[in-house]
């Protein structure tokens, strides 16, 4: 199995046990593919309901997006709620929105219940750069309050935002005190510890090579197999050809983050006085926050081609300096990246195949909160309460055009248009 990739997260991860490789045959009520936030959330919820659960992870717990992401826990999904409402109606869209808020709240609840130390800090802001984006934030706030019953956000003009954020880049912020940010790898490791304490058997270095479907499922690896009544597919961007009809509906997209050298408490706090996380509302966005050891964590590059951008460190540093020119003397100590999965519409793609194989994918950059919710919703369905999953399954999803050969270059060309829109005034 591979170690966690070098990152500030892995450098500051809490000690965690290595789990064994699957060897031989195991039986369980439920087998889960994927030791990230979705899979571990489902495993934990199922174990709390009395099910025996086996989790199969190809690498290490938290090796994928769950242990590499920006760590911002935000309400909603990867697409605008209007896109979901257009398909399933406003009433059901309101339910999905309320459930997304539950996903944010679930993180704090699990941290308290299972004593998970993951640097949980409340507060998040969406940032407008251009005048037209200020109008978008005003419409967004009105939509949240009038259509989705979500009060409490604050629209800050330039003067107000600069009381909290030491940058001249933004024209307005929409501040939400209920969203948050966390150390995602430590949260994932904490979920694994909590699940193990409830009897969940976790196997690392155990890549699933074949799934045999039927009344009972068999998940096979190079050295073993697990037989179970139910299965959960939580591999997201790493399904590796196991279920083509699902894999064709998502695309892996590279995202990248850097961590500055430590700034010291006083200098760091002068940059973001209230400790919130921030993300602008460009299509290819910048997002940033402070770490517990007073670094600037800054994300802002994407790759739709499957190839990491060249000179990543200098480019990330330049993006950070565009927001905070006062950090021109500050070096970058960590740069890392990884794949997240996006759906064509950026809407969540959660459901079931047949009667006993469940899946959740298409988190589209909104996974910190939505993954935990997905695990809970799937566990409810396996337990015979499928009302919530049935609503998600009404969202229609299409395969990316171009097939295996052409879908990546087609997506790259499409993204050029959205990047041009970001540059427009």
Image (spheres, rainbow, N blue to C red):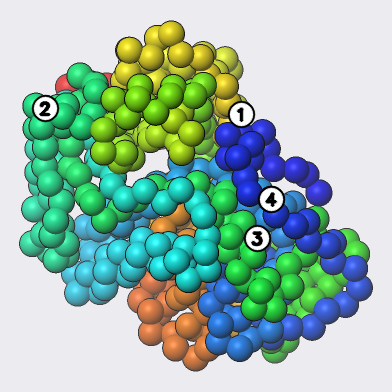
Rendered image quadrant of residue 21: bottom right
**Numbered tag placed on residue 307 in the rendering:** 1
Rendered image quadrant of residue 287: top left
Q: Is residue 46 above or below residue 208?
A: below
Q: CA gap, disc 4 to disc 2? A: 43 Å
In front: label 2 or label 3:
2
Of the residues under marks 4 and 2, which one precedes in the sequence? 4
| 332 left or right, relative to 27 | left
**Numbered tag placed on residue 158 in the rendering:** 2
Would residue 257 be seen by someone viewing this image from the given angle? yes
In front: label 4 or label 2:
4
| 224 left or right, relative to 78 | right
328 or 379, which is in the foreground? 328
In front: label 3 or label 4:
4
Q: How many marks?
A: 4
The residue tagged 3 is 35
Q: Residue at x 54, y 36 (%)?
A: 254
The x, y position of residue 260, in whole percent, is 49, 23
Q: CA gap, disc 2 to disc 3? A: 42 Å
Q: Residue furthest top?
A: 329
Q: Is residue 90 above or below residue 261?
A: below
| 419 left or right, relative to 351 | left
Q: Residues within 10 Å of mark 1 (few under 14, many from 20)?
A: few
The residue tagged 4 is 15
The x, y position of residue 325, in whole percent, is 32, 12
410 or 420, which is in the foreground? 420
Q: Is residue 318 above or below residue 119?
A: above
Secondary structure beneath disc 3?
loop
Secondary structure beneath disc 1?
loop
């Amino acid at each position: 199995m591979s170690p966690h990739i070098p990152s500030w997260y892995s450098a500051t991860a809490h000690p965690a046990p290595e789990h064994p490789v699957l060897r031989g045959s195991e039986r369980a009520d439920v087998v889960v593919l994927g030791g990230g936030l979705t899979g571990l959330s489902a495993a934990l919820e199922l174990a709390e309901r009395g099910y025996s659960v086996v989790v199969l992870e190809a690498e290490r717990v938290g090796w994928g997006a769950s242990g590499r992401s920006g760590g911002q826990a935000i309400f909603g999904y990867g697409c605008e709620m209007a896109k979901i409402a257009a398909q399933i109606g406003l009433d059901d869209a309101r339910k999905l929105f309320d459930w997304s808020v539950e996903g944010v709240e679930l993180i704090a609840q699990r941290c308290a219940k299972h004593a998970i130390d993951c640097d949980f800090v409340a507060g998040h802001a969406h940032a407008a750069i251009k005048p037209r984006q200020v109008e978008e934030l005003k419409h967004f706030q009105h939509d949240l309050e009038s259509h989705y019953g979500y009060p409490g956000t604050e629209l800050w003009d330039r003067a107000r935002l600069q009381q909290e954020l030491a940058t001249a880049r933004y024209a307005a912020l929409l501040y939400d005190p209920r969203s948050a940010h966390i150390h995602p790898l430590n949260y994932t490791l904490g979920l694994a510890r909590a699940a193990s304490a409830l009897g969940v058997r976790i196997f690392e270095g155990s890549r699933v090579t074949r799934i045999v479907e039927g009344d009972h499922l068999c998940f096979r690896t190079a050295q073993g197999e697990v037989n179970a009544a139910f299965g959960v597919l939580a591999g997201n961007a790493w399904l590796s050809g196991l279920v083509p009809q699902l894999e064709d509906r998502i695309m892996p997209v590279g995202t990248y983050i850097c961590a500055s050298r430590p700034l010291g408490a006083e200098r760091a706090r002068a940059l973001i006085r209230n400790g919130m996380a921030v993300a602008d509302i460009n299509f290819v966005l910048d997002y940033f926050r402070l770490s517990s050891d007073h670094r600037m964590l800054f994300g802002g590059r994407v790759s739709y081609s499957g190839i990491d951008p060249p000179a990543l460190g200098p480019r990330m540093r330049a993006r950070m300096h565009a927001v905070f020119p006062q950090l021109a003397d500050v070096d970058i100590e960590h740069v890392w990246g990884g794949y997240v999965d996006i759906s064509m519409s950026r809407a969540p793609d959660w459901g079931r195949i047949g009667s006993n194989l469940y899946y959740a994918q298409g988190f589209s950059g909104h996974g910190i909160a939505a993954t935990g919710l997905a695990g809970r919703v799937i566990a409810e369905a396996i337990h015979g309460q499928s009302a919530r999953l049935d609503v998600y399954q009404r969202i229609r999803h299409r395969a990316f055009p171009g097939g295996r050969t052409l879908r990546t270059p087609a997506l790259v060309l499409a993204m050029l248009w959205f990047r041009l829109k970001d540059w427009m005034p």
